[in-house]
Amino acid sequence: MRLPSAAAFLCLVPTLALAGQPDARCQGAPKARAARFSAKAMKDASPQERHAAYVQACALDEVVELTQQLVRFKTVSSEVHASKSPEVAAMGRFLQKWAKAHGMAYRAVGANDVFELSWGSGAPSLGLVFHGDVVPAPAHEWKRPPFEPYVQDGRLFGRGVEDDKGPLASALVALDYARQLGLKPQGRVLVIVGNGEESDWNGMGRYAASEPKPTHVISVDSAYPVVAAQSGFVAWNLVAPVGEAVKSPSATLRAVDVKGGEFLTQVPGAATLKLVPAEGRSLAQALTEVRAAIDAEQKARASLKAEVKEEAQALVLTVHGKAVHASIADEGHNALWDLSAVAARLPLEDNGIAAMLRVLAQRFDGDHFGKKLGVAYADDGLMGPLIAAPTVLRVADGQVTLGVNMRRPQGQDAATFNAALDKAAALVGQDSGGRLKEASGRYVGDAHVADTSGTLVTTLMDIYKRHKNAPDAKPTSVRGGTYARLFPKAVDFGPGFPGEEYTGHAPDESISLESLHLGTQMLAEAIHTLALTPAK
């Protein structure tokens, strides 16, 4: 009797590991385990079915363990560049040792810009792309230390478990299981790990431009079913000198510091404004005014979460939002919106901080799509509207700066969009009485769109539809940008499932064991179909 396909089997039977019942076939050393899924042990099963059965039965524990080992390396590229990071170097040594122990070649490219693990020989047939760096993880935002991963309530927690170290572990284990079964790739399979995705893409850009291109390239850094298009990344910055505060009889408070957000690609989950009383006013009077502003704004927006406290002869106003990745800003709650709204109710002396808060209130509050700035447009097909999010607000060296992250779809060329940004800069200059201007560092990227009718997309869509019993699923687009955009016709395949909250850039980042396991199985099938099955 021929066994059902692994995909069909998956749809009918929950994995024993997730059900708390370890599969006896997974006990013992790898050689003994693999023998239980060999052609001799599973006489009527195809090589692909045996590989799928092995991954389904045994992979999860190894994927979790490998993910935890990778997460313990604090590879925060925005804090220390890969070329100078001892943590990135240590992770490279770990991967080199892992590759040697599991029959794969390893090399570091550039100054630890890219780690490449490869299996097989000849021209590259399949490239699996990931990033080994992670975004910052401020400890005060996490319930437990972010680089000490743990499993709780069916989820794996830690910085990078979803973005991108869990998916990397899935790929390595899936490839190793194929190797243990004696399967061989048609050409080389590459696991490509860039170490600057969250900060500096130059290293991976050089790699993608100079190395031989695999026939198919899959990034596992976004969502399912298949991400065939990505919005263009935009960085836009505003700046103003803090300057001397302009006093007036009606202004009873002075803003002396402001802070919101941790990095450009995350919607701020909290923001603070430091205030002192104007000359001749007491701290108690100032406290009363701030509390009154909070109460008034609370009536206008029920979602407001704000408090004020005394701190060293000053007041600190704090508002709380919901931090999410900037590419899904409309699924979060931007704390800078609420901070600017409360500030708009305060009698502030006019300085650069007050001017920046006015611009936030006038040109950003309540608008995810850049309409108030005059930069809004949309792709009516796959990609939808542009999204714009103010994400980093700081005072340093006598200046107040605001970083704005936008994600733009196809449908408008770079020259036209740059002209719109020029007009937006002029608008905020007018709003602020000439205080604000655009700072250096503007970056306008183009959208990336793959061939939705090609072999890669149709193969991955077929895998997803069967595993998820979703016959009507269609390729999608994301506002995020991944390394896929550096490779012609590349796509993303996971790890986020539709309907599940993406936590990749958020505090307490986590991924469900069920999703991690299913993602491993689908990736294993993709590997087999695209790289292990002989061409017909």
Image: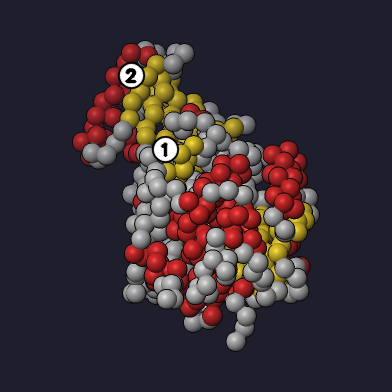
| Residue at far bottom of view | 536
Instruction: In this rendered view, identify the residue nearer to me: 15 or 144.
Output: 15
The nearer-to-camera label among 2 and 1 is 1
Which amino acid type corresponds to the residue marked 1 in the rendered image? Gln
Circle 2: is it few (<14), some (14-19), or many (20+) Cα within 10 Å? many
Residue 35 in percent (x, y) is at 59, 60
Q: Which residue is mark 1?
A: 152
The residue at 51%/40% (across/down) is: 158
Q: Secondary structure at mark 1?
A: strand
Disc on res. 287? 2
* Residue 433 visible here: no
Real-space Cα separation, disc 2 to disc 1, in angstroms: 42 Å
The residue at 43%/72% (across/down) is: 3
The residue at 27%/39% (across/down) is: 303
* Residue 272 visible here: yes
Q: Secondary structure at mark 2?
A: helix
Residues marked 2 and 1 touching at CB (< 8 Å): no
Q: Quadrant of the C terminus?
A: bottom right
Q: Quadrant of the N terminus?
A: bottom left
Circle 1: is it few (<14), some (14-19), or many (20+) Cα within 10 Å? few
Residue 96 in percent (x, y) is at 74, 50
Which amino acid type corresponds to the residue marked 2 in the rendered image? Leu
| Residue at far left of view | 299
Instruction: In this rendered view, identify the residue nearer to me: 290 or 168.
Output: 168
Taking 211 as reference, is 76 left or right?
left
Q: How is the image coloured?
A: secondary structure
Q: Is residue 296 above or below residue 190?
A: above
Residue 434 in percent (x, y) is at 51, 45
Instruction: In this rendered view, identify the residue nearer to me: 309 or 519.
Output: 519
Q: Earlier in the sequence, mark 2 or mark 1?
A: 1
The residue at 76%/68% (across/down) is: 210
